[in-house]
Amino acid sequence: MSDPLAVPPAGPAPEREVATDMVRRALPVAPVLVVAAALPWGLDGALSAAFAVGVVVANFLLAAFLLETAARLGHGAVMGAALFGYVLRLALIGAAVWAVKDLSWVEPLPLGLTLIVTHLGLLLWELRYVSASLAFPGLKPGATKESASR
Amino acid sequence: MLANLAILAQEAAEEGITNTGLAALTYGIAALGPGIGIGYLVGQSVQAMARQPEAAGMVRTTMFLGIAFVEALALIGFVVFFLGQA
């Protein structure tokens, strides 16, 4: 009997789809956040907000890439990729913010707030879409009759 | 609990532990919870995929979003740490 943890999960990889969806949604939101940060903090705030949006988007893409790659290897790899990926991505976010924190254009408050607002905002937005398409697959944009009946 | 934290902060101040050290310690503690959460979440998801492979797509979608939500807690901890530094 084969090791169940070494068996790759069946089916298509949804992580990349979810992550690219979130990146697509971030594109129109980013200018709004940048302008919102520019109002009280000026150009420095705008640059800091733009940097934060970039960090969040890169974080989502890296998470999707790690999980998708691990899923091809097996369930055990998914477990490892999720846990070590969490540590790795936190370290990368920390390093990215740490690398720029002393630069002249960095405003800590808009940088920090944009990190949290973008991360949670994009997630909630995607969650609305995902929960609707899981509950009513036929309503998913681009869904065919065949995929809806699956 | 609050009294204990106050005593810890007082001891830290007496021993010359800086705000940076305390902020780093707080961030470390803040990262523990999400680590446990992600471990539990992914463990349950892997079990669900092993039991019901045909639902793997749905499980992986919700697992990915769940991981990102749990990670938001750690991100908030990091931002508080970062703002405490600034």
Image (spheres, rainbow, N blue to C red):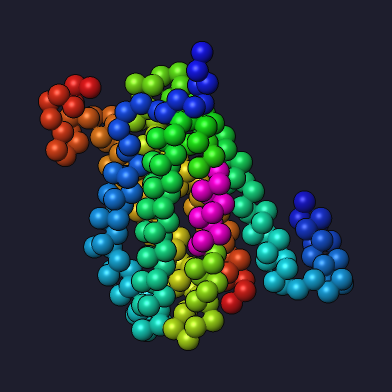
In the figure, residue B14 lies in which quadrant? bottom right
In the picture provided, is B74 more to the left or to the right than B1? left
Residue A94, given in percent of the width and then of the height, sits at 54, 64
Say if residue B83 shows up in the picture: yes
Residue at 87% from the left image edge and 71% from the top image edge: B15
Residue A70, given in percent of the width and then of the height, sits at 44, 39
In the picture provided, is A33 more to the left or to the right than A149? right
Q: Is residue B28 magenta?
A: no
Magenta stretch, main secondary structure class: helix
Furthest-bottom residue in view?
Answer: A104
Say if residue B63 shows up in the picture: no
Furthest-front residue in view?
Answer: A1
Residue at 26% from the left image edge and 55% from the top image edge: A25
Q: Is residue A89 magenta?
A: yes
Q: Quadrant of the C terminus of chain B?
A: bottom right
In the figure, residue B82 lies in which quadrant? bottom right
| Count of marks placed on residues | 0
Residue A44, given in percent of the width and then of the height, sits at 40, 82
Q: Nearer the viewer, residue A97 or A84?
A: A84
Residue A38, given in percent of the width and then of the height, sits at 35, 79
**Does residue A46 lie above or below B59 as drawn?**
below
Magenta highlight range: A82-93
Residue at 62% from the left image edge and 74% from the top image edge: B85
Furthest-top residue in view?
Answer: A1
Residue at 86% from the left image edge and 66% from the top image edge: B11
**Does residue A32 lie above or below B46 as drawn?**
below
